[in-house]
Every structure is written in structure tokens, then in C-alpha cells.
Image: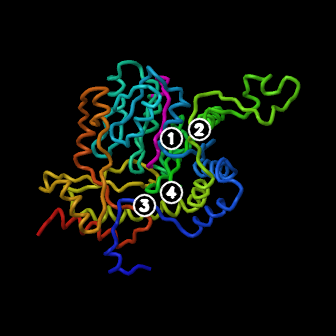
Amino acid sequence: MTSTSAREQLFLPYGGQVVDDDDVAAVERVLRSDWLTTGPVVSEFENAFARHLDAPFAVACSSGTAALHLAALAAGIGPGDIVIVPSITFAASANCVRYTGADVVFADVDPTTGMMTAETYADALSRAPAPPVAVVVVDLAGQVPDLPRIAEMSASLGMTVIEDACHALGTVYESDGKTYTVGSCAHADYCVFSFHPVKAMAMGEGGAVTCRMPSDAAQLSRFRGHGISRDAGTFANRSLAGLDDREDANPWYYELQDLGFNYRASDIHCALGLSQLKKLDAFLERRRTLMALYESALVDLAPNVRPIRRTPAVSVGWHLNVILIDFDEVGVSRRVVVDELKERGIGSQVHYIPLHLQPYYTDLYGQVTLAGAENYYDRCLSLPLSVSMADEDVMRVVDALKAVLRPQ
């Protein structure tokens, strides 16, 4: 065990993975097996992941970005379509729409949570130049916006709901007296996850899409693998498949039925994912404990420093520890805070720069003012949150923040 004095010398990044000997052993077993990719461990991971989230189906892929693109493709989004996306999110949430040739209308967010609300969603709908076909609802830091209400609004307009839950693995929320696990697709057509090392569980790189319908799962799988199908029941060219006089197709036969991509997850990655999935509940519980310690320790810095506002939830699967700092009021710039925390061995990050201010999107759509997103961005800062942290690390971070914001 690392001593307190030794821990004080460790650099604390804003996030990171925990990989144990059993994770290494799981990957080693695959490396010594006959299958490194497109093998049985991929299906095993998909089935286990779906069960864990109470989801009917899960399709694993190479990254969270790939998962978002697959969901957009499966939803039939394409050129001429419009999709609503909140401005506070990682670039992939909007880029996946652009990959299909469709256009984005950015929604504003609540400046105290960073998430889209029913009201900002309605505003974005009113600004759209044509009726949107879909919305990407982003769960931020682990919290979920008013997903049931947004889903209800979307259903009334015939829109597809893609839930970007890359931050919210393990979150459980309530609606009308019932509890739902993020990923169960109770209020979304597709739910997307990332297994990047800074997330709640790691695959190195990896992602997944959950969905309700078997036809959607089949389509996601097909898009993931070049658009190729080996299911004889779907073959269009029965003669070429050898089905004119036989019930089984030629063993070498496959059909290219869509323009797909190589977004497959390997057995190596899924072996790590399976091992990490077994520890996910313990990981999340530790993150909740650390967040509670942070919330208590930050009280001394109120009102100029506050955690993001907590939204109603049964249990949050925290990914990020985002605080809001009134930099003007404390008289210290964010750049100074970031630099001086780093000098004290504390990593931090900003999640996120509003997408409507990014040059790629201003070149496409011109300048847009979204006051909530800009207010949130002006104040947000992510502090370290990782299962590898000890309780005393929280006080080390908060004490360093106090020293930076209250110089003697």
C-alpha cells in the first residue's frame, strides 16, 4: 500500500483505468486461443453487457465514436436530414450526424448541469430549418437529463432518440415511479457507450450500442462488419447463394447488403471488457463514495465553487467530477488554476468547449449564441476522479484548489 507521504508525490490525472491481474489473465487467455477477433468472446461480452443493463440487445464495436456512427446509420439518418444535438458534449456526438451527410442544429443546455432540457430542446426544434428526424440526448458526467420528457416530445414528432450514454454507464433513473437502467432503451431507440480508459470500465478502445429490436441489432452488426451478411434468410441472390436446390447456402457465400465499415471489436478487447464488467458495480460504488467526499469537502468554497447541480436519479454512475467556478468573482483565471494545480500534481480538464463555437461548425452554420452552454463552459472544470484514488487524495485535491483560489 502506498504511504500518505508517497501518495502526495503522485500525479493525479482527471481520470484513468484500473487494470488488475485478472484482467491481464483474461486477455492472455484470448492471446493463447485460436481467435483474436470475430470470435466467441465478442458474443459473450455482448450478451453479458446486455444482461447487466437489462437491454434486449447489445452490439460491441471499436469505439464510442463508432457506436454513435452505427446508431445514426441504423436510424436511417442521411443527407437532407436534421438532427438536434446539445452543444456541450464531445465532438463525436455531433460528428456522427455529419458522417451520414445530415445536418446538426445545436441545443442550448442548463448552465448548472451542462445538459439539454425539455425547454432548450423545444427551442432547438423551433430553430430547425426543417422538421428534425432525430435527437442525440447526451448524458453528462454520469447524470441523465429529463430523458422521459424528451423521449415523449420526440415520439410525438416521429423522431428517433439516440442516447449518448458514454458518460453514464451504471446510472439508474426514475420515471413515473419506475426505475430504469441507462442502456435498457426504455426511453431511447439506441443507447451508446464508450469503454475508453477514462470511463467507468475500460477495454483500451471499445464501444457498444444497445437497442430494443432484433432487426436493429442485426442492422448494427451488419454496418459494423462492412455491410456484409452471412444470414441465409436475408440473401437477395438465392441462386448465387446456392439456395435454388438446397436449404443451406454455399459455405463460402456472403452478401454485401449495405455500405458498412470495419468497426468490429476484437476478442482481445472484449476479454478485457468482460473482466472489467464483473467489477463494474464495485468501481461505480467507489466513484460514488469519492464524489460524496468531494461534495462535502467543497462546501467551504461555496458559493464561488460548486459541484454541477445534481439531477434526480436513483443512483449515478459518475464518470466526471465537474465543478463550476466563478473565476471572475474569485479573481483567478481558469488557466492559472489549471497550471497551478498541475504544479501541485493535480490534473484537471475542461468538459467541454461548446460545439457551436468550434470552427468546423461555425463555418457550416455561422455564429450562434447559446447562453446556457457558454455560461457553463466559462465556469466548468473537471477534477480527478478514479477508482485508484484514496480518500485522502480527495482532500489533497481540494486543499490544492483552496490554495490556488485563496492565495495567502
Residue at figure coordinates x 33%, y 68% from the top left: 11
| Label 3 Cα neighbours within 10 Å, binned few <14 / some 14-19 / many ≥20 | some
Q: Nearer the viewer, mark 4 or mark 3?
A: 3
- From this view, report whether residue 258 is shown above or below residue 147: above
Question: What numbered label is drawn on residue 66?
Answer: 1
Q: Tell me the quarter of the picture where residue 126 sits.
A: top left
The kind of secondary structure element at disc 1 is: helix
**Do tag 2 and tag 3 residues touch (Cβ < 8 Å)?**
no
Decide: few, some or many residues near mark 4? Use Cα within 10 Å; few <14, some 14-19, many ≥20: many
**Mark 4 or mark 3, earlier in chain:** 3
Could you tell whether 237 is left or right of 127 in the image? right
Magenta stretch? Answer: 154-167
Q: Earlier in the sequence, mark 1 or mark 4?
A: 1
How far apart are the alpha carbons under marks 1 and 3? 21 Å
Foreground pick, 195 / 178: 195
First in residue order: circle 2 vs circle 3: 3
Q: Which residue is mark 4?
A: 201
Can you identify the residue that label 3 sits on?
A: 16
